Image (spheres, coloured by chain):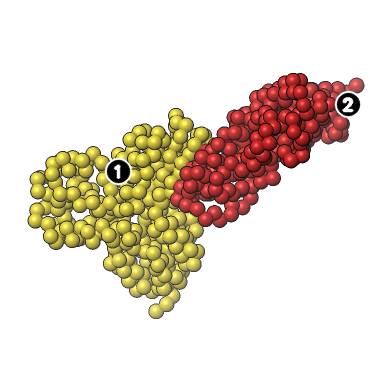
Chain colours: A red, B yellow
């Protein structure tokens, strides 16, 4: 079967940067190396790191002295970093600069008296990190969900870096009517926007779409949502092991998109499986 | 016929304030008194001022020395005020405080490097005045119209005081996606919002709506638009002289709303005409 791979599929600049950093640290550290939470939201990539001796912990309290603590792409909660520094542990900051940006905005605008509103998922590591940098009250608004009453004249609105543009637009617009001043800083990363635009046009050109990436990856899930709106035959898988031939009955061309945290070798594995699939009726 | 009058119909606080101020000036001035442009957008009210000897000019250049120049509710262009002060003329500022607010915001945020975007009518006196206070480039976006490309990272968005909320919301939302930072200050005046909400609920309860006010009054025209969306039998008139009995065939209750610049006596004239109208089939 013919496979069209989105040109933006696979690691974004920020993920590649962090992954390279962790590899380097793992090669040179004298003591144990751990990441605070999974380094990226891709179980296959995390497994490879584990093979290289890089562990994963949830909190600084779990590690012994002499451990190198790596902050993952999504950033970390400020208090955890303070704790690591307080203990004299070596901290390697792998936070994506595009995630550092909303952290800095939350800190600066909360200090200026704005109530910080974040359009995103309150349970996502990135958002927990951003909240921890705010010096005042924060409200997380779930995309497409209701917007609670916020008792503030001035609100600052930022977005999870992987937020869908239309969701940010809707929240900013609605708040502009409710509050005297709304200061919206578009913190959606360029890569996310390009990848989503790319997935959108790919979905229009093919008979089915496969989106590859961690089920726990917000940006991968959003890609699948976007594709499914255009092409209902959209499948979100982590590896080729989940694919089923019957999903592609009658398909001539399959589109392949992948999240920012999906390694190239995982994308290639899926592409190889799809290329090897004979279309029904062909020998 | 039964007539329901919106509780917010007629002069708003700002218009009443300016009208009272002009009356006082007219009673006590030693020389001629003129307003820069019609004092409010209501031909009937302006005619009454003319009877009291208060003239209307378009520019300070038209008046002689010793003239008292009154700035109307909608404000004036900064350069005209500077010209009047430069000539030593007495200036009475009748600008509504709710109009002074967007003027001040345009001045402050343009000085901070924001490109100022105003949601409103570029030909309206209020907007011409607001633009004149901006220290940098300004773009006026017509409600419901296209949003031009604006070559700026930071934009500040304000609204004409009489803008419909949903129009402001749409522009702010769209800009939040296009620009790195959008600082939206909701300059729609409370009176406008209440009056629009009031008209909306009135339109739902009646068989026809009459909106009373100057054809040149932006806020009155918006009230008519809002009512017409709910009740297609909506008529915008300046006085009872325009009303036609056949407009109300089959109606039992007529709603009456009026713009912020419509004098009570004009509202009462229309209400009286409607009350006197016999419903078809009744004696």
Instruction: Please tell me whether residue B262 is drawn above or below residue A195 in the rendered image.
Output: below
Residue closer to the observer: B172 or A44: A44
Percent across and percent down for residue B136 are 35, 33
Residue closer to the observer: A161 or A58: A58
Q: Residue at image x 84%, y 29%?
A: A240
Percent across and percent down for residue A236 are 77, 35
**SS at mark 2?**
loop
Determine whether label 1 and label 2 are within 8 Å by CB.
no
Which residue is labeled 1 in the image?
B129
Q: Residues within 10 Å of mark 1 (few under 14, many from 20)?
A: many
Left or right: where does residue B87 sit relative to residue B231?
left
Q: Residue at image x 26%, y 42%?
A: B77
Left or right: where does residue B83 sit relative to residue B125?
left
Which residue is labeled 2 in the image?
A281
**SS at mark 1?**
helix
Which marked residue is nearer to the observer: mark 1 or mark 2? 1
Left or right: where does residue A280 sit relative to residue B218?
right
**Can residue A79 be seen by looking at this rendering?**
yes
Q: Chain of mark 2?
A: A
Image quarter hosting the N terminus of chain A? top right
């Amino acid at each position: 079967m013919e496979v069209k791979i989105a040109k933006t599929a696979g690691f974004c600049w920020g993920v590649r940067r962090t992954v390279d950093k962790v590899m380097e640290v793992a090669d040179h550290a004298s003591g144990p190396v751990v990441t605070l939470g999974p380094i990226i939201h891709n179980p296959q990539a995390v497994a490879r790191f584990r093979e290289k001796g890089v562990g994963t912990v949830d909190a600084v309290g779990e590690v012994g002295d002499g451990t190198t603590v790596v902050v993952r792409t999504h950033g970390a909660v400020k208090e955890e970093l303070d704790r690591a520094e307080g203990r004299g542990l070596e901290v390697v900051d792998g936070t994506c600069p595009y995630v550092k940006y909303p952290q800095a905005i939350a800190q600066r605008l909360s200090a200026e008296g704005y109530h910080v509103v974040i359009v995103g998922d309150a349970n996502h590591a990135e958002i927990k990190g951003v909240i921890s940098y705010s010096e005042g009250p924060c409200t997380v608004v779930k995309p497409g969900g209701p917007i609670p009453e916020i008792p503030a004249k001035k609100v600052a609105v930022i977005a999870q870096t992987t937020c869908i543009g239309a969701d940010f637009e809707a929240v900013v617009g609605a708040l502009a009517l409710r509050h005297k001043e709304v200061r919206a800083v578009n913190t959606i990363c360029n890569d996310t926007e390009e990848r989503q635009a790319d997935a959108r046009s790919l979905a229009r050109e093919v008979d089915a779409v496969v989106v590859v990436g961690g089920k726990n990856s917000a940006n991968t899930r959003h890609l699948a949502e976007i594709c499914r709106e255009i092409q209902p035959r959209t499948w979100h898988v982590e590896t080729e092991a989940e694919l089923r031939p019957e999903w592609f009955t009658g398909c001539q061309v399959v589109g392949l998109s992948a999240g920012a945290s999906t390694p190239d070798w995982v994308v290639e594995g899926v592409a190889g499986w799809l290329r090897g699939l004979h279309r029904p009726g062909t020998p």
